Image (cartoon, helix red, strand yellow):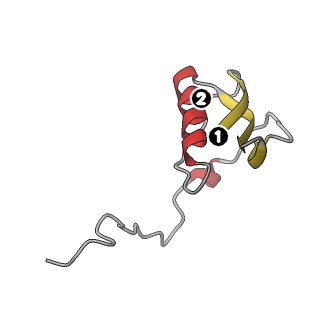
Amino acid sequence: NREAEVWVTKGLGKFPLFKMGGRQQGAAEAWQEVVKDESAFPLSAVTREGGKEISKMEATKIEKKTLDDALFRIPDGYKKFDTSMMGRPKQ
């Protein structure tokens, strides 16, 4: 009963995919596969269940500009947190 409507462009580069949980997971994963396969960037993504909107993501402004490299550097004092063993029984 879920459907997704997605408007995309190929002019903005790749979209960073993420895992979603909850009720919209199936429909969200379906449109993300389309985005990944087409190397497209979603400008609008609406997920509906039984005709009712349950989630919406929409670009409201796109601005071409140069960003400072410092925005992409690992901050001083950063420590990696390994979550791979969380929830597993101790041996």
Q: How many marks?
A: 2
- The mark that comes first in sequence, 1 or 2, is 1
**Which quadrant of the view contains residue 87?**
bottom left
Q: Quadrant of the N terminus?
A: top right
Residue bearing mark 1: 2
Q: Is residue 35 left or right of residue 62?
A: left
Q: In the rendering, at what x and y percent does residue 75 appear?
A: 54, 64
Q: Residue at x 72, y 26 (%)?
A: 8
Q: Amino acid at mark 2?
A: Val
Task: Classify 85 as above or below 54.
Answer: below
Q: Is residue 61 visible?
A: yes
**Which quadrant of the view contains residue 70?**
bottom right
Residue placed furthest toward the right: 60
Residue closest to the eye, 83 or 69: 83
Bin the neighbour count of mark 1 within 10 Å (Cα to Cα): few under 14, some 14-19, many 20 and up.
some
Measure how far apart labels 1 and 2 are at the Cα level. Answer: 18 Å
Q: Residue at x 58, y 51 (%)?
A: 72
Q: Is residue 14 left or right of residue 9?
A: left
Q: In the rendering, at what x and y percent does residue 62 appear?
A: 82, 36
Q: In the rendering, at what x and y percent does residue 77 appear?
A: 48, 72
SS for tag 2? Answer: helix
Residue bearing mark 2: 35
Task: Classify 91 as above or below 84.
Answer: below
Q: In the rendering, at what x and y percent does residue 71 appear?
A: 64, 53
Q: Residue at x 40, y 66 (%)?
A: 80
Residue placed furthest toward the left: 91
Q: Is residue 16 visible?
A: no
Q: Amino acid at mark 1?
A: Arg
